[in-house]
Structure formats: structure tokens, C-alpha cells
């Protein structure tokens, strides 16, 4: 049976370089990448040249480090788009953007944290520096990141939160400064209201609410985040934006098999 499934060994060998980059989560020097993949640098280099031609790998001209390329991102996003939760959510977010006149982002948990996989823009211009592939870190600096921190299992998010506390405990920018007490209070507030909120951060002048979508096993599968100018964004937990966003997230959750809540 194994003879019938024989593959191309050189592709499998080269694939270990891509796997090493994914595990590391950041660009790497050739010698480090080769060592992680278990091969000499001279052997790794031709693979990286070919991967570069395909757009799977990019080399930073200034540092010489190798990272995943644009085509690798496209492959990953295409795979994410095939997930059932995204298929269920995509039609709803277009209507939601029109109803609220806000931009709506769909985010899932990726290997580097909350990752935006789709943005539905409303008819009015809202300038938000975000696109598919954006990773919403620091985790506690955005509504999307806070939502995942509140509703994913702690064993998944705690290492990232701890790392942020170590780095941002004395940050120069007050908006980034964090403490254990602040994190715990923020997460408790999100669980109480069932959604996360960010006012003026990480993007000054932009407010956001983020609501969770759960599957039949009550596992968080994705986040719906509504974003818009603070001047016209109702930040009330029980306001029309929060209410409509939560309603949409619950409807999608029900389509994924989560039981409807009893009145």
C-alpha cells in the first residue's frame, strides 16, 4: 500500500523548511532555518530559492531573514475560507455591515493569534488599517483579541497573555500598559456581557465590538467584529450596535448547531 502512495521525496524534504517557519512563527536566518529543518544550509538554500519563485517564501533584503510569502498567506486564507463556520458567517456579515453601516471583520484563531480572514465594508468610507491576514496582537489591545482571550480555553491564550504582561507592564504608551488586575477585570466584563469592546484602541478614533460564534460543542469558532468612527459609534453594552451584533452571532451559532437560548 505504501508503494501505491509513493510521493516525491524532494518536495517532502523541502516541506520541512516551511514547517519550520510555521513552528517558529517569525522570519529566520538561513542557518537557523536549516538547523530547525534538520539539513545543512547549502542543501536548504536551493529549496528556498524555488519557494521564493512560487511566492511561498520571501527574503527580507535588509536582514536576510526568510519568512512566509504572499502565496503562503493566500493558501492559508483559502483553506480557512473552506471551514464550515466561515461559510455560515459570510452571508450574514454583508447584511450586518449594511444594517449597522459599519465595517465587519471575521477573525479566527491562527497559529500566531486572532487572524482576520474577511472584512465586509459598509457603503460609507471607514478608514481602518486592517486587511485579511492581519493578526490582532497584542491580544488585550483590541476587541477581537480580548474576545478570544475571554472565550478560548485558558491553556491556549494564557501563554500569550503572560508574554504581553511581561512586555507591556511598563509600556510608554498608556493604551498598551497592562496589569494582571486589569486583564482579569477586562475578561470578567467580557464574559458578563457576552461580547468584547474596545474604545479608541488599537486604532485611535475607532471603536469596536466583537461577538463570539460558537459551534454545537459550545467551542468558540470565530469572532464577528464591528468597527466604526467613535463619533457615530454607540459604545453602550445594550445599545443598538451591540444588540444587533450579538443577535447575528447567535443566529450563526445556531446554524452551526448550538441550541437556541431559552427566553
Image (cartoon, grey):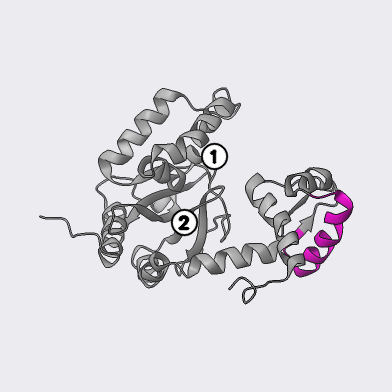
Point out residue 194 in the picture as x, y percentages from the top left corner. 28, 46
The residue closer to the viewer here, 183 or 6, is 6
Question: Which label is found at residue 138?
Answer: 1
Residue at the farthest left position: 263
Instruction: Give the crowd class for mark 2: few <14, some 14-19, many >=20 residues within 10 Å.
Output: many
The residue closer to the viewer here, 110 or 251, is 110
Q: Is residue 29 left or right of residue 182?
A: right
Residue at the farthest bottom position: 4
The residues colored magenta run 39-57
Q: Is residue 229 left or right of residue 41?
A: left
Q: Secondary structure at mark 2?
A: strand
Q: Is residue 222 left or right of residue 248?
A: right
Point out residue 48 in the picture as x, y percentages from the top left corner. 81, 59
Residue at 41% x, 70% y: name it.
Answer: 90
Image quadrant containing the C terminus:
bottom left
Question: Which label is found at residue 114?
Answer: none
Residue at 44% x, 67% y: name it.
Answer: 83
Image quadrant containing the N terminus:
bottom right
Q: Secondary structure at mark 1?
A: loop
Residue at 62% x, 74% y: name it.
Answer: 5
The residue closer to the viewer here, 250 or 110, is 110
The residue closer to the viewer here, 202 or 36, is 36
Is residue 230 among what the camera can see? no
The residue that label 2 is drawn on is 107
Q: Is residue 160 above or below residue 26?
A: above
Point out residue 124 in the picture as x, y percentages from the top left corner. 47, 66
Amino acid at each position: 500500500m505504501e508503494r501505491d502512495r509513493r510521493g516525491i521525496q524532494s518536495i517532502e524534504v523541502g516541506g520541512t523548511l516551511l514547517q519550520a517557519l510555521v513552528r517558529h512563527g517569525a522570519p529566520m536566518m538561513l542557518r537557523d532555518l536549516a538547523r530547525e529543518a534538520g539539513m545543512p544550509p547549502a542543501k536548504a538554500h536551493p529549496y528556498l530559492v524555488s519557494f521564493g519563485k512560487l511566492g511561498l517564501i520571501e527574503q527580507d533584503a535588509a536582514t536576510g531573514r526568510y519568512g512566509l510569502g504572499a502565496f503562503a498567506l493566500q493558501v492559508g486564507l483559502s483553506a480557512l475560507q473552506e471551514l464550515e463556520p466561515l461559510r455560515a458567517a459570510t452571508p450574514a456579515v454583508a447584511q450586518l455591515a449594511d444594517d449597522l453601516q459599519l465595517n465587519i471583520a471575521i477573525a479566527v484563531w491562527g497559529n500566531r493569534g486572532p487572524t482576520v480572514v474577511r472584512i465586509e465594508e459598509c457603503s460609507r468610507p471607514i478608514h481602518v488599517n486592517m486587511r485579511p491576514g492581519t493578526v490582532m496582537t497584542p491580544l488585550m489591545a483590541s476587541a477581537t483579541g480580548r474576545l478570544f482571550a475571554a472565550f478560548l480555553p485558558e491553556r491556549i491564550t494564557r501563554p500569550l497573555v503572560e508574554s504581553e504582561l511581561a512586555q507591556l507592564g511598563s509600556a510608554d504608551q498608556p493604551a498598551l500598559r497592562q496589569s494582571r488586575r486589569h486583564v482579569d477585570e477586562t475578561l470578567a466584563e467580557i464574559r458578563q456581557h457576552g461580547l468584547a469592546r474596545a474604545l479608541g484602541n488599537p486604532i485611535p478614533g475607532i471603536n469596536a465590538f466583537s461577538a463570539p460564534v460558537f459551534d454545537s460543542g459550545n467551542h468558540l469558532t470565530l469572532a464577528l467584529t464591528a468597527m466604526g468612527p467613535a463619533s457615530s459609534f454607540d459604545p453602550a453594552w445594550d445599545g443598538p450596535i451591540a444588540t444587533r451584533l450579538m443577535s447575528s452571532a447567535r443566529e450563526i451559532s445556531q446554524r452551526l448547531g448550538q441550541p437556541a437560548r431559552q427566553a
